[in-house]
Image (cartoon, rainbow, N blue to C red):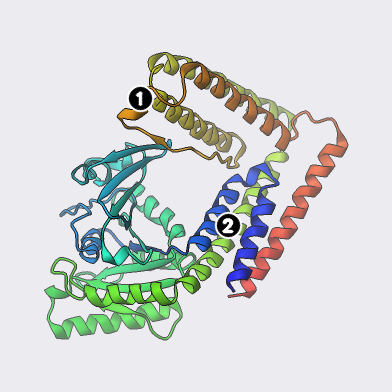
Amino acid sequence: MGENILEKVKQLETLFGKYEITGRELMQVRTLAKKIEKQEMTVSVIGQFKRGKSTLVNGILGDKVMPVGIVPVTAVVTTVKYGEERTARVHFENGAVVTCSFDEIGGYINEQENQDNRLGVSRVELSVPADFLKTGITLVDTPGVGSVHQKNSDAAYAFVKESDAVIFLLSVDSPINQIEIEFLEKTRAFASKFYFAVNKADIVDEEDLEAYLSYCRRLIAKLMEVDEIQLFAVSARKQTGLTELEEAVERDCRQKAADIIQASVRLKLRDIVQSALHQITLYRTALSMTGEEFEEKFGKMNQTFQEVQEEAAAFGREFAGNGAMLQAQLNQFKNQLSDKVQQLFGIEYHYDLPEVEMDETAVGSGLDQAVFLRQTDQLCEELSRTLNTIFMYREENAYTVVRRINDLNRLVRSLARMRSELAAEE
């Protein structure tokens, strides 16, 4: 199965590399190829808000890594990998990366300090010398779903697609509710391995706990369409019951990691293929616009290019000596242009954003002002040419139009065939 899945990943990489509108999908399948190659399993702790996910992560790691509190705390996804020393790196949506101390990560992770993720953090990446992580596990703490903070729920739902295995956390002080059921159903589409943990087992007596566990086993097995599930009663606060959970995950990582990752990749490929087909549908809809509509939208796009170039001139003057800030701003322009393409034409346009280390050594290095302005101009010019090409704007050569449409039809047929093959392997 492993070679078959890797072969499909490579096939899709070739297909997506031929067309500009599938840049995001190309990036995704390349990430999956690396996942198969490195055999690193991502285990995410997910669930509704205030179930004790961060406390559970701390208990598993045997280290107070994640901030915890009486109100919903986790606002952004936090990944934890093995490292000989404790390190913390904050990644931002514009590619900027800040190294900070563990005492400072709350300012980026906490909902109270980074409300609605106003700082634009994409993830926080930690390294700690925890035995649990030595086998190559990446443990992930995710924001809880179902709170009043919608961005937290959005971040949790988005990261589900990155998970290979999931620790789904419930709590004895609340029956399984519809939010949790819907979240579990969405998670099933991407993760291939599930461990269910019922937290706060210490606050009820043994009889009530067993009744709740029995109820969970029946309901979750039905939802997952399996005969039985792995269910663990734990107290994250008192750190009881964690050993059994840790041993189950570690054992699977040693003995079944390849199978779990391959099954996870197959699920993700199915979603990527469907995403590409949806993107093509949106593209075809955009192609059906009238000449007047195209004129209007390209006019607005050109206006955006002008605004970006004017902003670059002002930014370049202000940060002429800070190459890292200039590179981060160039990344931000890419994000702005991608958003504008989606707004005007309804399709996604993907840019790879290089990481920018924002420390003391970065000042004075990286882009200089002249290069920054030149690359901003190139960014606008290249996107303008690409949009003209893919939408065949004012294209008068009938052969070129027919060829591109035929290429698109071949892509659709190949993706439909791949979708059928992936469905047949379930």
User: What residue is shown with label 2?
Assistant: 272
Can residue 420 be seen in the rendering of this structure?
yes
Q: Quadrant of the N terminus?
A: bottom right
User: What residue is shown with label 1?
Assistant: 363
Name which residue type carries label 1: Val
Task: Identify the image quadrant of residue 50.
Answer: bottom left
Residue 190 versus residue 244: which sits nearer the camera? Answer: 244
**SS of the residue under disc 1:** loop
Relative side of 21 to 262, left or right = right
Q: Earlier in the sequence, mark 1 or mark 2?
A: 2
Can residue 51 be seen in the rendering of this structure?
no
Horizontal and vertical percent position of residue 357:
38, 35
Q: Residue at x 42, y 59 (%)?
A: 160
Q: Residue at x 29, y 82 (%)?
A: 215
The answer to whether 36 is drawn above or below residue 84 in the figure is below
Residue 120 versus residue 132: which sits nearer the camera? Answer: 132
Q: Are marks 1 and 2 in contact (CB under 8 Å)?
A: no
